[in-house]
Amino acid sequence: MRMLRAVVRKEFIHIRRERRMLVFIFGAPLLLLALFGYALRLKVDNLNVAILDGDTSIFSMQIRDTIISEAGFRLIDVRDEDEIRELLYKGKARLGLVIPDDFSDKLTNNETATLKLFVDGSMPVLAMAAMNGANVLTGEDLAANLVFEDPEKESPKFRPPPVRVDKEILFNPDLKDTDFFLPGIIGIIIMQVTLILASLSIVREREQRTIEQLMATPITRRALIVGKMIPYAVIAAVDFAVIIGAGHLLFDLPFKGAPILIVLLAALYICSLLALGALISSFSQTQPQAVFLAVFILIPSVLLSGFIFPIEAMPTWLQPVPRLLPLTYYMDGIRALTIKGTGFGTVAVDFAVLAGFMIIFTLLGIQRFKKTL
């Protein structure tokens, strides 16, 4: 029993000496709990709706007010249906609503008016939330406000529903979950493999005391870091090719966009993760520290990048956090390329930000490597 107590005491002393580990062990869970407690929401309040109001009457104003006040959506006025499709294609709106020119005429003639609703189906969870929110258009409260009473005529004995909604789901008409989740799963698998391997690369040399031997050679620090990352880049590229090929063969993952863009996006994503892993490795003193840091980035990336929970559903003050994660931009780009078949112009921002991450993380890693040796 005495020996057991001695071993336990020794282990606690080791843990106490690793102050960075203590921060990760006790600080990270609290931070993640606070982030996820605020961030993870399925109800979407601040959804953009592109609206074409061809009637501009008091009745169409009732429609607009109901969407804003009861559904909590934001309206973007457009000139025609093509603009609605364009906004949905670029991801700047999730719903599109067309109020026809004869909307008020139908209501005053005691007929049912048809509203056309376009839904972005590329993200089924968000599409379902959006359609649930749009149910206010056929609710009883709105119907009561769309009744027209002619004082010179007797009220009709039967009133048909004033509004009927004709839905058209774009990009993923069947709302297939696999089309939505598989691109994200590929990104997470690549991140897990690449980030952890890269984060262990330099710190492993430091723990094995072989880093001094490497530094004694004429090789520059920049060449050393890049040289250590290249094998992991090859591994990640092979992993990506195998996984995305298997996804296409086994689950019929669509490739509507140009294959070269998909490959370039994956290359930038992998390079940014390798640079981030090298930066983590330069900060860490031990391999467990490096793994903790990598996991600390991996978990928020999975839950905050839009993989499961829509970024639009997060509180406004928290939405900048996912914009600091490479997976968010890979997720945006790969879904746009595979599901919507967009061109480079639509995903150019994702490419640019991933390239920016790669450059910044690489420079920070090299700078940090100089200071610690």
Image (spheres, rainbow, N blue to C red):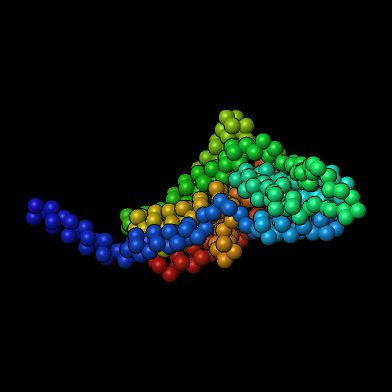
Q: Position of residue 254 (x, y in %)?
A: 66, 36
Residue at the image point whose x is 37% and y is 61% from the top: 24
Q: Position of residue 257 (x, y in %)?
A: 71, 42
In the shown orientation, is residue 212 left or right of residue 76? left
Residue at the image point whose x is 43% and y is 70% from the top: 371
- The image quadrant that residue 5 belongs to is bottom left
- The image quadrant that residue 151 belongs to is bottom right
Residue at the image point whose x is 9% and y is 52% from the top: 1
Q: Nearer the viewer, residue 47 or 137?
A: 137
Q: Position of residue 69 (x, y in %)?
A: 68, 60
In the shown orientation, is residue 180 left or right of residue 82? left
Q: Nearer the viewer, residue 321 or 142?
A: 142
- The image quadrant that residue 29 belongs to is bottom left
Q: Position of residue 143 (x, y in %)?
A: 74, 50
Instruction: Answer whether residue 218 is visible to the viewer in this image.
Output: no
Residue at the image point whose x is 36% and y is 55% from the top: 287
In the shown orientation, is residue 312 left or right of residue 25? right
